[in-house]
Amino acid sequence: MQDPGKRLGKDWKSSADRAVTTATDAGGLKILVADSKDAYQWRTVATLAEPGMPADTWIGNACAMDRDHVAAVYAPRTFTNKPDLMQGGAFTAIVDVKTGTVTKLPFTASLAYFDPTCNPETGTAVFTAFRDHKTRLLTVTTSGKTTADASVNGQVTSAVPVDDGLVAARGHNLVHVSPAGKSRTLTGADSVPFQIRPTRDGVAFLDRSGRPPGHGCGPGAASRRRWRPASWATSLSNRARADGCSSPGRPRRNPRPAAA
């Protein structure tokens, strides 16, 4: 980057800001990092692949567990052609982006767009796998230790770790899943909740409107929503979208899941 002082501000060299992304090729899933103090010069800290496994290109997803650790799933591109591999056959790893150390995990997971999902406040990540009409949800620390291995009947998606378990989508409901795999409904939604994120006072997620065409808030329009415990002033806030649409919720009285 030319003239970082002008583009980034006078404190760019002392800033701890860090960006993380991925890139793929025939060599593997590459974890790239860029720091403010280096004027956001990208560098590859790790390449994830499995020796001896042929691939025209590797694919995968990653998320930041904290400033120095990334959770990732990766697999040959052809895994997407096999439902069993797509839903639970991808390799998993934790990458220390400071040292480049890769900790490969002893289980496989899905290649779904939401897998894995991290919570930097708890320093954990959750990996998801779908098998035999059940969802397996594994919570892992930055050291690669599995702290919870829950199995839930049916399909649970977009799970994110919180202090006392997970918050996820199950059908059109936002649910809390305990480490033992017991689930309870927090609130309903118009469609399947996605992009679920813990907040200071609850859980934020995206929802899609089920309104009919011509309404102005047509089908597929995404809205931001937030679940808050019923013991608070508001159980589910109505968040207006840029198009003026709001998304009413159906709060239920449930204890608050510990959120970051």
Image (tube, rainbow, N blue to C red):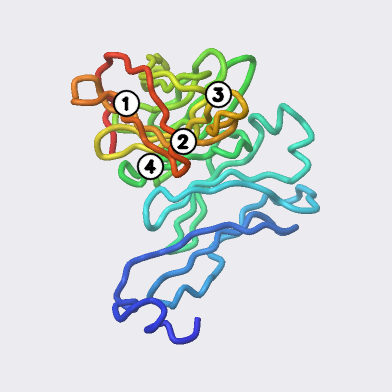
On residue 210, which mark appears? 3
CA gap, disc 1 and disc 4: 21 Å
Name the residue nearer the viewer: 152 or 91: 152
CA gap, disc 2 and disc 1: 13 Å
Q: Which residue is tagged 2?
A: 223
CA gap, disc 4 and disc 2: 22 Å
Amino acid bearing label 4: Asn
Mark 3 or mark 4: whose residue is earlier in sequence: 4
Which quarter of the picture shows residue 228? top left
Q: Are marks 1 and 4 in contact (CB under 8 Å)?
A: no
Name the element at disc 2. strand
Mark 1 or mark 3: whose residue is earlier in sequence: 3
Amino acid bearing label 2: Ser
Residue at the image position 63 percent from the left and 59 percent from the top: 23
CA gap, disc 2 and disc 3: 11 Å
Mark 4 or mark 2: whose residue is earlier in sequence: 4
CA gap, disc 3 and disc 4: 29 Å
Mark 2 or mark 1: whose residue is earlier in sequence: 2
Residue at the image position 50 percent from the left and 19 percent from the top: 172
On residue 119, which mark appears? 4
Vertical placement of residue 60 versus 166, above or below: below
Name the residue nearer the viewer: 116 or 45: 116
Image quadrant holding the C terminus, namely top left
Expressed as whole percent of the image width and height from the top left, the position of residue 238 reads 35, 30
Q: Nearer the viewer, mark 1 or mark 3?
A: 3
